[in-house]
Image (cartoon, helix red, strand yellow):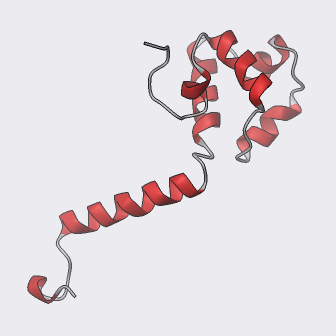
Amino acid sequence: MFALYGGKPPLSRCFEVTKVIFCELHKALGGTFVFFNRFKQLCDQRNISVYRACTDIGLNRSAVAKWKNGGKPNGSTAAKLAAYFEVTTDYLLGQCDERTPG
């Protein structure tokens, strides 16, 4: 397959393949850890703990453990968190990179 390259693919091709594999895995997992990473980042920007954010909007602290393990908040919880951080739910859930609409 890579006879033209002396049996080895060029490094740039390896990066392309790796990127495709990562993107497909990310899609298959539904962006599993994007939510928690964004949630944690938003908490850090406000200098609050993830547990504090949960209690501020009336959630049980146990939600954090679920989210750390790849879970996502349900629709109403995502809406509350988005309002709390003044971002869109799409941003919070990792479906876009724009924090606010428009």
- At horizontal 63% and vertical 46% (from top left) the residue drawn is 32
| Quadrant (top left, top right, bottom left, bottom right) of the N terminus | bottom left
Residue 31: x percent and y percent?
57, 45
**36 with respect to 23 (left or right):** right
Could you say which quadrant of the image residue 2 lies in? bottom left
**92 with respect to 77 (left or right):** left
Residue 88: x percent and y percent?
57, 18
Could you say which quadrant of the image residue 60 lies in? top right
Residue 53: x percent and y percent?
75, 17
Q: Nearer the viewer, residue 99 or 46?
A: 99
Q: Nearer the viewer, residue 102 or 62?
A: 102
- At horizontal 55% and vertical 34% (from top left) the residue drawn is 94
* In the image, residue 8 above or below residue 36: below
- At horizontal 20% and vertical 82% (from top left) the residue drawn is 8
**90 with respect to 73 (left or right):** left
State how many labels appear.
0
Residue 29: x percent and y percent?
61, 54
**100 with respect to 63 (left or right):** left
| Quadrant (top left, top right, bottom left, bottom right) of the C terminus | top left
- At horizontal 36% and vertical 63% (from top left) the residue drawn is 18
Could you say which quadrant of the image residue 33 lies in? top right
